[in-house]
Structures are given as C-alpha cells and as structure tokens.
Image (tube, rainbow, N blue to C red):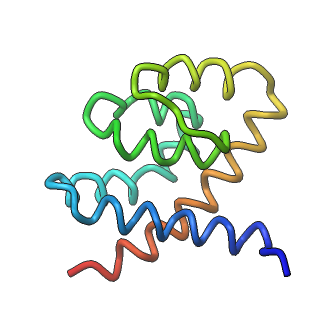
Amino acid sequence: MSQTIDQQCAKSAYDAYNTLRNNTDKEKIFSYAKKLPMMIIHSGLPNALMFKLKDHGVFVKVLLEWLVGSNIPETEIENKINSELLSDATKLRYHTVKAMRWLEWFNRFADTEN
C-alpha cells in the first residue's frame, strides 16, 4: 500500500530531524525552523530561504531537496531556488504549501527536543 502525501511529508521531516539533531548548531536550526513559516508568509518562500542560506544552509538544503524531490549539491542551492521556485507562479504556490506542511511536521519533532 502506498503512503499518502502527508505520510511522505512526515517521514521526510522526521528523517531531517534525526539528521539535524546531531548538528552542533541544532538550537539555531530549530529556532530558524520555528520562525520560517511566518517568514514565508511575510516574504515568500524564496526570500525566506535565501535570507538564512549562509547561516543555515544544511537546513535549507534538506527542505529544498524535499520540495524538488532530488539531491542538490550545496553549490547549486541558490540556482535551484531561482530555477524551481521563481520560474512559475503555480509552482511557487505548490512548493509553498508543500514547505509549510513539511515545516509543521519538522517543528512537531523539534518540539520534542529537550
């Protein structure tokens, strides 16, 4: 039986959480993840991701890989944001909804960290 989109989203977010919770900057990453949904609402997905790309590139990479469905070299993150998210308004709306759902799951898992 195949998984629903929500189940796939939760699994991806949980895998990302498990990977990032061992990062030395996990507190900053988790804090950014909690703020990101509001940043997306106010500034849009591409701007919110680009804003912290240098500080939280690992987190942005994981989220972007979920959105586009493929591995992305770290040197190509900025280009991928421009090509995937800014190429078409319909794609941008789709990826924004998908990112918000993923962040909801990721933040649920991050909230268990203490």
- Residue at the image point whose x is 80% and y is 28% from the top: 89
User: In this figure, what is the number of numbered marks?
Assistant: 0
Give residue 88's position: percent from left, percent from top.
80, 23
Quadrant of residue 21 in the image?
bottom left
> Is residue 88 positioned above or below 11 on the image?
above
Q: x, y percentage for residue 40? A: 54, 43
| Residue under the point 58% across and 24% down | 80
Quarter the C terminus occupies: bottom left
Which of 42/55 is in front? Answer: 55
Q: Position of residue 29 (x, y in %)?
A: 29, 53
Residue 17, quarter of the rendered image: bottom left
Q: Residue at x 46, y 76 (%)?
A: 108
Q: Quadrant of residue 58?
A: top left
Q: Residue at x 29, y 28 (%)?
A: 54
Residue 39 coordinates in the image, percent (x, y): 47, 43
Q: Which of the two residues, 47 or 81, is positioned nearer the viewer here?
A: 81
